[in-house]
Amino acid sequence: MSTTTIRLPQDLKERIAKAAERTGKTTHSFILEAIAEKAELEEQREDFDAEADARFKRIAASGETIAWSDMRQYLSDRVSGKDVARPVANKKRG
């Protein structure tokens, strides 16, 4: 384990101390957990962006999409518990 020094504004330091106390954690463990959660969120965002880029490239290459109205109806039916077939992708018009 390595050591990193961070300088916190006094008001933030007090907020962290109070939050740590409420959760029954030390200030140190609270800060470590917060940093780990932030790193996890950024990793998830990176994965999400990469997946979105890959999907867009597939759409651009194939020209096939599903109309939002069709997808919305499909999702609504699924949430309602209906057994429905997935909508079929079609070539973009125009």
Image: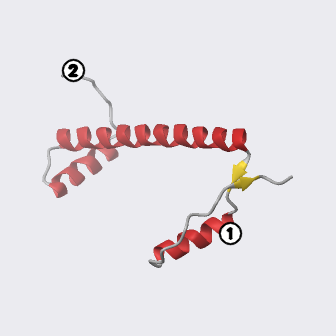
* In this picture, residue 27 sits left or right of residue 52: left
**Badge 1: few (under 14), some or many (20 or more) residues near its Cα, within 10 Å?**
few
**Residue at the spot x=61%, y=69% of the render?**
72
Give the residue type that dot 1 points to.
Ser
Which of the two labelled residues, at mark 1 and mark 2, occupies the earlier sequence position? Answer: 2
In the image: residue 64, left or right of residue 12:
right
Quarter of the view holding residue 22 = bottom left
The chosen color scheme is secondary structure
Q: Which residue is mark 1?
A: 69
Q: How many numbered marks, from 0 up?
A: 2
Label 1 element class:
helix
State the residue in front, 4 or 40.
Answer: 40
- Quadrant for the N terminus in the image: top left
* Residue 76 x %, y %: 54, 74
Foreground mark, 1 or 2? 1
Residue 16 percent coordinates (x, y): 26, 47
Secondary structure beneath label 2? loop
Amino acid under disc 2:
Ser
Mark 1–mark 2 Cα distance, whole angstroms, equals 53 Å
Q: Residue at x 57, y 70 (%)?
A: 74
Look at mark 2 in the image and give the residue it sits on.
2
In this view of the protein, which residue sits in the foreground, 12 or 69? 69
Q: Residues within 10 Å of mark 2 (few under 14, many from 20)?
A: few
